[in-house]
């Protein structure tokens, strides 16, 4: 028998699970996320291994979903210094790199940038040619002052040649060991947002390196020597440690993604809404063909506007510990919460604060704490509040739907007992006894992906042939990442006609996923 | 006279997205340009139109092109120095101040950046009182004031001076040049004397925009926000509060055409609204009956935060208030309606001022 371990580090909890090769859950472990995340991971790993008593030599895969990159940005700690090269001159000088960034974050990254010749027009023509000696001079002046480089070219999401040339020159001048982020590999249209995401990616190179090393050491310390190690990405797929070292930003928001994927796996549903109820807030996401729907608008990370792919999630201020107050107009629910102190402060646990959990207990929907402590709350009032919780959830779910049709909702998370079983616009609510560790399960069952993107001129190549070609390259990518060939399937095809581009040009992007071999 | 500082720019940008009436382009890049310029060169003087001497020459600073290109390639910043210099030579007169051609979208921000950089004042007026898709849709056109001589440039340094026979020709030729310049251009347009500006502009629109932004900023922080405060500030009418149930879009000839369906909620339950848009919102029906058309402004704001919504960001389930804002009275003349009324946009509808249509609705 082979085994795999999934670990998910969230804001509040670090969860770990062990599955066998048929994906049966053998052991689960939930603990508070400690200040020292690495120690927390080691601890969870140790406990879940103790509980399961499996042979460590039979562990083949270990997956980690972690918030370390997000934390580093929010706390401005352990970040690398970045030299930012924008290929655009003379265009775009009116808004230079780092505009509208928080001053302290800019300082931590050293704030070094230069806008130099380069870039493309909307139709793929050259905006201005890159100038090699200009680039070499710039890199000379940065020697010893920066840890990493970020390269961003105007319209590089259409044409990436210049960015790749600059990468080669950086390695020649500063050495192969200097990591470089190219914006064409990170974000989409929107120069400022893509630039911001690319800078953040470069800033995280140091963090991801220590995270990866720490995890490797933890596994060795637990006697796991033969497992392949993966980090979770925010699109629900895995990356090898060497890939992760190049794209640390893709780990951001992998937690909600893992919850959604885990919920989908537990419920066996490929299309549904996932409601993950925590102690203070609830996250709502959409699962589409087994993967989380991606956000189509600009996303802020640590106060910085970016546009790289992120799961489309909304959060509402409703959780198991949400505080309920009486006003002259009726009851209000949240958005503040007693949080992890629920076992001291909630009424059913002998506290003085009325929470959503108390309501569920009062109405006999949940059995935690002592029901006697909440008996003084009139049953009509409890029912009214319960209904209010239902309509808050219904409104939030409705915002995430694509159409007016009723939809199935998968309910997971520790606070899920406070949600009524009948909600407007919802055909069915699915709960699972292991919903509390859906995120770690999501990490564990993740697949690997391959992606390919290219502009095809349909006057020169037939559409079907172009699609075949793109798919061929994407499949090869997936196999390289460790996918089993037979299991590979296409999950996303994007075809964008480039209206201004000559020769009936279209940009095709194909993404495939497959099971780990 | 007063000064525009960083907070004012933030507020004007929010107001400008409301006055975009669903279109106008996201003012975000323009806002960053204005903020960068003010940080470097200091705050901008805002003049009331009455403070502009009769013989002084003023010129609008604006950008033309595809919003999807603006987000990727934006100006160097010093284009307008060159444009102002060329036009000064051509016209043989110094330029006293600049002003926005339109108060909605990205063009609300360009003149702030220009004024800061050139050390010129900006006039508290525009020529639309909102955003419109074509440059001849200006109150100046009502009075036969010409858009040219104008100066147009790209970030590469190519400069053109145009002298055309009509404002519609200016639109056509400038649009063609813009495509060659890489789908975006910077221009100085509508040179106009203080005397004429006072008679033909939309007055105090920058202040109006700022007040809208300030109101939305303050309301977003409070609980139990009501839409009434925003209506009081804008002189607008509440049309319906509801949920977007369908958005259909097609792109044709460089414009986004489409239709938004909104189902009423709370007090508006069982009512339905249908909005027809061409970049901007053009016509609005409530329960099948027309309640607003261009040139009046049909605007959507977020149900909770009152943040203005553009048509690009709309999708199923979004909760919004629909409000209607009366346009500048100059648009309600025969000439004005010919230029920007519902028929110009291809809808066989008579223009009736929003306050009359809304009143009629209230008596139903």
Image: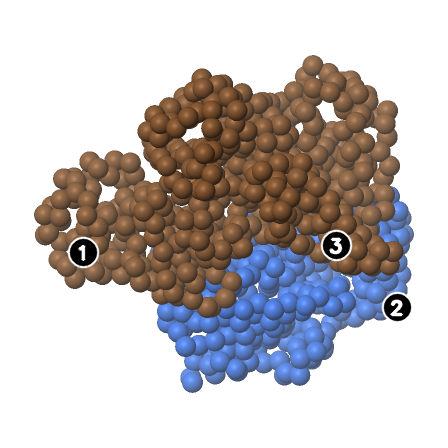
Chain colours: A brown, B blue
Check disc 3 and report the residue beneath it. Answer: A467
Q: Is A437 situated above or below B50?
A: above
**A113 or B120, which is in the foreground?**
A113
**A323 or B45, which is in the foreground?**
A323
The first of marks 1 and 3 along the sequence is 1
Q: Are marks 2 and 3 in contact (CB under 8 Å)?
A: no
In the picture, residue A127 is in which quadrant? Answer: top right
Q: Chain of mark 1?
A: A
Q: Nearer the viewer, mark 2 or mark 1?
A: 1
Which residue occupies the extreme bottom position in the image? B364
Which label belongs to residue A363? 1
Which label belongs to residue B165? 2
Q: Nearer the viewer, mark 1 or mark 3?
A: 3
What is the quadrant of the C terminus of chain A in the image?
top right
Residue at position x 20%, y 42% from top? Answer: A346
Residue at position x 41%, y 77% from top? Answer: B270
Question: Does residue B93 appear anywhere in the picture?
Answer: no
How far separated are the C-alphas under marks 2 and 3? 50 Å
Q: How many marks?
A: 3
Q: Chain of mark 3?
A: A
Pinpoint residue A12: horizontal percent, then vertical percent: 37, 35
Structural crowding at the residue carrying mark 1, measured as other residues with C-alpha within 10 Å and reported as few (<14), some (14–19) or many (≥20) = some
Q: Are marks 2 and 1 in contact (CB under 8 Å)?
A: no
Pinpoint residue B112: horizontal percent, then vertical percent: 67, 46
Q: Is residue B291 left or right of residue B150?
A: left
Q: Are marks 2 and 3 on the same chain?
A: no
Q: Secondary structure at mark 2?
A: loop
Structural crowding at the residue carrying mark 2, measured as other residues with C-alpha within 10 Å and reported as few (<14), some (14–19) or many (≥20) = few
In the picture, residue B343 is in which quadrant? Answer: bottom right
Which residue occupies the extreme top position in the image? A144
């Amino acid at each position: 028998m082979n085994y795999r371990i999934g670990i998910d580090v969230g804001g509040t909890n670090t969860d770990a699970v062990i599955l066998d090769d048929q994906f049966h859950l053998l052991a689960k472990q939930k603990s508070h996320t400690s200040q020292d995340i690495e120690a927390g991971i080691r601890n969870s790993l140790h406990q879940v291994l103790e509980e399961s008593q499996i042979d460590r030599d039979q562990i083949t895969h270990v997956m980690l979903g972690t918030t370390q990159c997000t934390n580093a940005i929010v706390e401005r700690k352990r970040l690398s210094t970045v030299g930012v090269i924008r290929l655009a001159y003379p265009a775009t000088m009116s808004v230079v790199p780092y505009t509208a960034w928080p001053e302290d974050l800019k300082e931590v990254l050293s704030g070094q940038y230069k806008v130099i010749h380069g870039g493309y027009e909307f139709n793929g023509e050259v905006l201005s040619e890159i100038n090699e000696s200009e680039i070499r001079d710039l890199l000379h002046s940065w020697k010893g002052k920066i840890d990493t480089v970020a390269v961003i070219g105007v319209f590089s999401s259409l044409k990436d040649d210049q960015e790749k040339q600059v990468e080669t020159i950086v390695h020649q001048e500063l050495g192969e060991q200097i990591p470089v982020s190219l914006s064409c590999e990170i974000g989409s249209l929107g120069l400022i947002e893509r630039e911001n995401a690319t800078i953040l990616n470069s800033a995280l190179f140091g963090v991801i390196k220590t995270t990866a090393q720490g995890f490797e050491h933890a596994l060795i310390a637990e006697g796991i020597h033969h497992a392949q190690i993966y980090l979770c990405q925010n699109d629900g797929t895995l990356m090898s440690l060497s890939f992760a070292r190049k794209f640390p930003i893709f780990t951001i928001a992998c937690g909600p993604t893992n919850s959604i994927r885990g919920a989908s796996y537990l419920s066996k549903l490929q299309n549904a809404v996932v409601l993950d109820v925590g102690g203070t807030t609830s996250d709502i996401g959409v699962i589409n063909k087994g993967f989380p729907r991606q956000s189509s608008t600009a996303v802020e990370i640590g106060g910085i506007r970016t546009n790289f792919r992120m799961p489309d999630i909304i959060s509402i201020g409703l959780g198991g510990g949400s505080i309920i107050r009486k006003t002259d107009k009726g009851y209000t629910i949240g958005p503040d919460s007693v949080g992890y102190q629920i076992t001291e402060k909630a009424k059913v646990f002998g506290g003085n604060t009325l929470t959503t959990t108390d309501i569920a207990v009062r109405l006999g929907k949940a059995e935690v704490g002592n029901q006697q402590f909440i008996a003084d709350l009139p049953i009509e009032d409890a029912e009214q509040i319960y209904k209010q919780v239902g309509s808050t959830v219904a409104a939030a779910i409705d915002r995430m739907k694509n159409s007016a049709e009723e939809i199935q909702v998968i309910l997971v998370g520790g606070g899920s007992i406070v949600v009524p079983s009948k909600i407007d616009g919802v055909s069915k609510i699915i709960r699972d006894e292991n919903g509390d560790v859906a995120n770690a399960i999501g990490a564990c069952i993740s697949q690997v992906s391959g992606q390919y993107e290219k502009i095809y001129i349909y006057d020169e190549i037939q559409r079907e042939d172009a699609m075949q070609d793109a798919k061929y390259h994407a499949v090869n990518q997936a196999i390289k990442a460790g996918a089993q060939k037979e299991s590979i399937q296409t999950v996303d095809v994007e075809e964008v006609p480039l209206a201004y581009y000559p020769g009936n040009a279209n940009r095709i992007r194909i993404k495939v996923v497959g099971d780990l071999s | 006279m007063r000064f525009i500082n960083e907070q004012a720019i933030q507020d004007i940008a929010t107001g400008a997205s409301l006055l975009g009436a669903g279109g106008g382009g996201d003012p975000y890049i323009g806002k960053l340009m204005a903020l960068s310029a003010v940080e470097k060169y200091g705050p901008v003087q805002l003049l009331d139109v009455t403070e502009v001497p009769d013989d002084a020459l003023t010129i609008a600073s604006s950008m033309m092109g595809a919003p999807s290109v603006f987000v990727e390639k934006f100006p160097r910043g010093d284009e307008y120095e060159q444009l102002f210099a060329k036009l000064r030579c051509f016209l043989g007169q110094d330029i006293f101040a600049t002003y926005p051609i339109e108060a909605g979208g990205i063009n609300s921000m360009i003149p702030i950046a220009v004024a800061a950089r050139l050390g010129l004042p900006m006039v508290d007026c525009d020529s639309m009182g909102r955003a419109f898709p074509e440059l001849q849709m200006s109150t100046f056109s009502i009075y036969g004031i010409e858009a040219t001589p104008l100066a147009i440039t790209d970030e590469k340094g190519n400069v053109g001076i145009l002298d055309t026979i009509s404002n519609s020709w200016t639109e056509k030729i400038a649009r063609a040049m813009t495509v060659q310049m890489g789908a975006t251009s910077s221009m100085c347009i509508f040179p106009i004397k203080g005397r004429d500006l006072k008679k033909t502009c939309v007055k105090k629109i920058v202040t109006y925009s700022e007040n809208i932004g300030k109101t939305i900023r303050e309301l977003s922080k409070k609980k139990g926000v009501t839409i009434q405060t925003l209506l009081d500030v804008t002189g607008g009418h509440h049309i319906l509060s509801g949920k977007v149930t369908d958005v259909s879009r097609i792109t044709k000839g460089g414009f986004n055409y489409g239709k938004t369906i909104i189902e009423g909620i709370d007090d508006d339950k069982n009512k339905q609204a249908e909005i027809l848009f061409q970049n901007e919102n053009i016509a609005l029906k409530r329960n099948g009956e027309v309640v607003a058309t261009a040139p009046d402004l049909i605007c959507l704001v977020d149900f909770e935060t009152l943040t203005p919504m553009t048509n690009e960001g709309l999708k199923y389930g979004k909760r919004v208030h629909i409000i209607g804002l009366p346009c500048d009275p100059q648009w309600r003349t025969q000439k004005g309606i010919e230029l920007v009324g519902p028929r110009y946009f291809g809808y066989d509808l008579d223009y009736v001022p929003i306050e009359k249509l809304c009143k009629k609705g209230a008596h139903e």
